[in-house]
Amino acid sequence: MSDQLSLFGDAEGAETSNEFRDSVARAHEEALPIAAALPDGVFFGTSSWSFPGWAGIVYSRKRTTTDLAREGLREYARHPLLTTVGIDRSYYAPLQFADLASYGDQLPPGFRCCIKAPASVTAYTLGPRAERNPEFLSIDRLVEDLLQPLALAFRDHAGPIILEFPPFARGARLEPDAFLDRLDFFLTHLPREFEYAVELRDRTLLTPRYRDILAGHGIGHTYNYWTAMPMPGAQAEIVPPEEPPFSVVRLLLKPGTWYEDQREAFRPFNRLQAPDEAMRNDVVAVAGRALKREKRVFILVNNKAEGSSPLTVIALAKRLRRGFDVGRGL
């Protein structure tokens, strides 16, 4: 009986594996002509890649979160529409050389990742008590914790470095002009071996002066779709996407929603549950404006935006392709 059960389990597992493999093959077949018709300079990807619920969408078999975190990039990068990816873990702790080398071994030549700068550099306060961060906007810390490891172990795959500035804690905030003074000084002294994009999480900082500072240093802006920020289209009215050398679009959370709520509602991230037509229209419009001027655009999607990052990528890519197919130039 035990042998029979084992055999049955193996057969069932093989059938499930074949189903996932066939589903991924169909997804690739559908995505290939879409990818081929996209304009040069647009790169779609997801905020991370270690989601077992993507079996049959990105991955050809069931795999654990740990396995995907270590080895999933190899199969992720085979998807015709996934031509960049976000590396978020660098925000919380320095990346190890061995991990970076492993990521690089899994990626094809020319595949560029969007990498978050550490909170040790971009957070004005740290910890539950919101204690002032003595290394806020420290070039030395940025070099030690991120730029040096990237230069030594991941240079060929290092795309834009995202400088995400989290919201100020209550009772411990910088006024916009004071923040922008410090940002201007910081950007002046950044090592130029890498590209950078600023992401704001406080709408009061998004001003014409901020735009001018980015322009003066050749720094990109991150048009984020996030709880407490204006929609990407509204951000584009302050920072026109035609101006920076490149732009990043990060689709994280619908304004007014919260991470924990969306995570619980959308698990296991294998279907679209809350498509947002306004957001999609904004993304295509922002990307189109940049691409028309031959500027690069990196579009990163989080599962918490609509329910499944890779499925949102497919929907956005189809819409962007349609705009260029009919010759509107968006």
Image: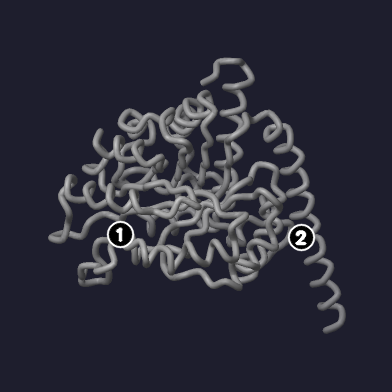
x then y, percent, for residue 232: 38, 35
Horizontal arrangement in the rendering, residue 47 relative to residue 19 (left or right):
left
Residue drawn at point x = 67 percent, y = 66 percent: 71
Which sits in the foreground, 46 or 6? 46
Q: What residue type is labelled 2?
A: Thr
Q: Which amino acid does label 1 sit on?
A: Leu
* Residue at the extreme top of the image, as rendered: 327
Residue drawn at point x = 25 percent, y = 71 percent: 128
- Quadrant assignment, res 320: top right
**Label drawn at residue 137:** 1
Horizontal arrangement in the rendering, residue 175 relative to residue 193 (left or right):
left
- Quadrant assignment, res 68: bottom right
Labels 2, 1: front one = 1
Q: Vertically, is 77 above or below 289?
A: below
x then y, percent, for residue 233: 38, 31
First of labels 2, 1 by sequence position: 2
**Label drawn at residue 16:** 2
Label 1, secondary structure: give it. loop
